[in-house]
Image: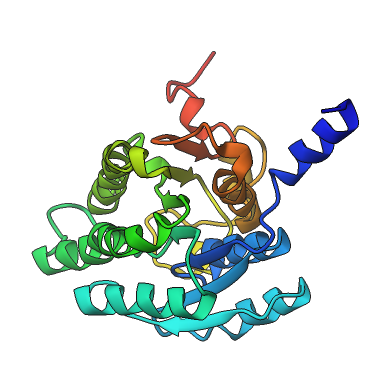
């Protein structure tokens, strides 16, 4: 292989032409950024949503030349997860990429957090991820495949009052590593991405103990700015591509240096 051929081959490995991808929770925010990035690299994408209108995401997919398909499903239910995978696989003619992005969060001190709230959060964040991944294995195993689960910096270090959310993302990390080893002989890669502060609609509108603003975020993130959905989309697209063929069972934090900063004030 000549140098020019090697460079062309290396570039091609980063692209996703004809790959078939399902992104859960892709109507807005990080999921939307992931879906658009996958499509921009050539993938055909199914947009999962739980009820929020996915019209904006589908419009953005059209802007990059892709006709997306949307499917509504409640990921807290076994039958709904299985139906989602079945319908997505049928719509795409197979499945190469599964991105388990859908999730909910609750900010409440542990003494005020009800057991029902805890169960509801885990039902979507952890159980939904597990159920979708399990249901997708036969389709992904047809030719190998890539699964990317969405974790969080909350799984790395504590930030009150997010105990339940942090626990759910810690579970995602553990699941990612173990399932990656279970599926390694089937050539299915399983990784996770842990976003830091990302500017999404929920970032501004959710009731929080700290008033999240772009300026506040930029002041505490070492890189000097808040992340954007496309920042996460780029990493997910890389992990889904052949360029990441030697990466499995890993959790990559995309946080502008947040998890690397010691929390003790300097002089």
Q: Image check: 21 left or right of 1?
A: left
Residue that appears at 60% across and 32% down? 222
Above-or-below relation of 263 to 64: above
Picture quadrant where residue 37 is located: bottom right
Q: Nearer the viewer, residue 8 or 46?
A: 8
Residue 223 in the image, given as x and y percentages of width and height: 65, 35
From where the camera sits, is residue 200 visible?
A: no
Above-or-below relation of 109 to 220: below
Q: Nearer the viewer, residue 237 or 214?
A: 237
Residue 261 in the image, given as x and y percentages of width and height: 50, 25
Q: Image check: 94 left or right of 109?
A: right
Residue 4 in the image, given as x and y percentages of width and height: 90, 32
Picture quadrant where residue 179 is located: top left
- From the image, which quarter does the C terminus lie in? top right
The colour scheme applied to this rendered structure is rainbow
From where the camera sits, is residue 149 visible?
A: yes
Residue that appears at 70% across and 62% down? 42
Q: Residue furthest front?
A: 1
Q: Nearer the viewer, residue 2 or 150?
A: 2
Q: Image check: 178 left or right of 25?
A: left
- From the image, which quarter does the N terminus lie in? top right
Residue 99 in the image, given as x and y percentages of width and height: 46, 58
Q: Image check: 3 left or right of 175?
A: right
Residue that appears at 29% across and 65% down? 135
Q: How many numbered dots are placed on residues in this image? A: 0
Picture quadrant where residue 74 is located: bottom left
Residue that appears at 77% across and 41% down? 11
């Amino acid at each position: 292989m000549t140098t020019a051929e090697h460079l062309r081959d290396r570039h091609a490995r980063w692209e996703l032409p004809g790959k078939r991808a399902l992104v859960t929770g892709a109507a807005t925010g990080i999921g939307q950024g992931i879906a658009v990035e996958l499509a921009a690299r050539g993938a055909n994408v199914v947009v999962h949503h739980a009820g929020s209108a996915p019209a904006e995401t589908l419009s953005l997919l059209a802007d990059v030349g892709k006709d997306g398909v949307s499917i509504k499903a409640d990921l807290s239910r076994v039958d709904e997860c299985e139906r989602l995978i079945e319908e997505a696989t049928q719509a795409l003619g197979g499945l190469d990429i599964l991105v388990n992005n859908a999730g909910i969060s609750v900010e409440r001190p542990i003494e005020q957090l009800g057991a029902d709230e805890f169960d509801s959060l885990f039902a979507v964040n952890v159980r939904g991820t597990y159920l979708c991944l399990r249901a997708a294995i036969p389709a992904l195993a047809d030719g190998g495949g890539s699964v990317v689960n969405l974790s969080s910096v909350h799984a790395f270090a504590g930030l009150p009052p997010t105990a339940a959310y942090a626990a759910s993302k810690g579970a995602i990390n553990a699941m990612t590593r173990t399932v990656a080893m279970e599926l390694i002989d089937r050539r299915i890669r399983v990784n996770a991405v842990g976003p830091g502060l990302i500017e999404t609609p929920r970032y501004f509108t959710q009731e929080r103990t700290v008033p999240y603003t772009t300026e506040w975020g930029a002041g505490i993130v070492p890189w000097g700015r808040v992340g954007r959905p496309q920042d996460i989309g780029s990493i997910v697209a890389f992990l889904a591509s052949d360029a990441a063929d030697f990466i499995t069972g890993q959790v990559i934090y995309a946080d502008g240096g947040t998890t690397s900063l010691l929390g003790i004030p300097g002089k």
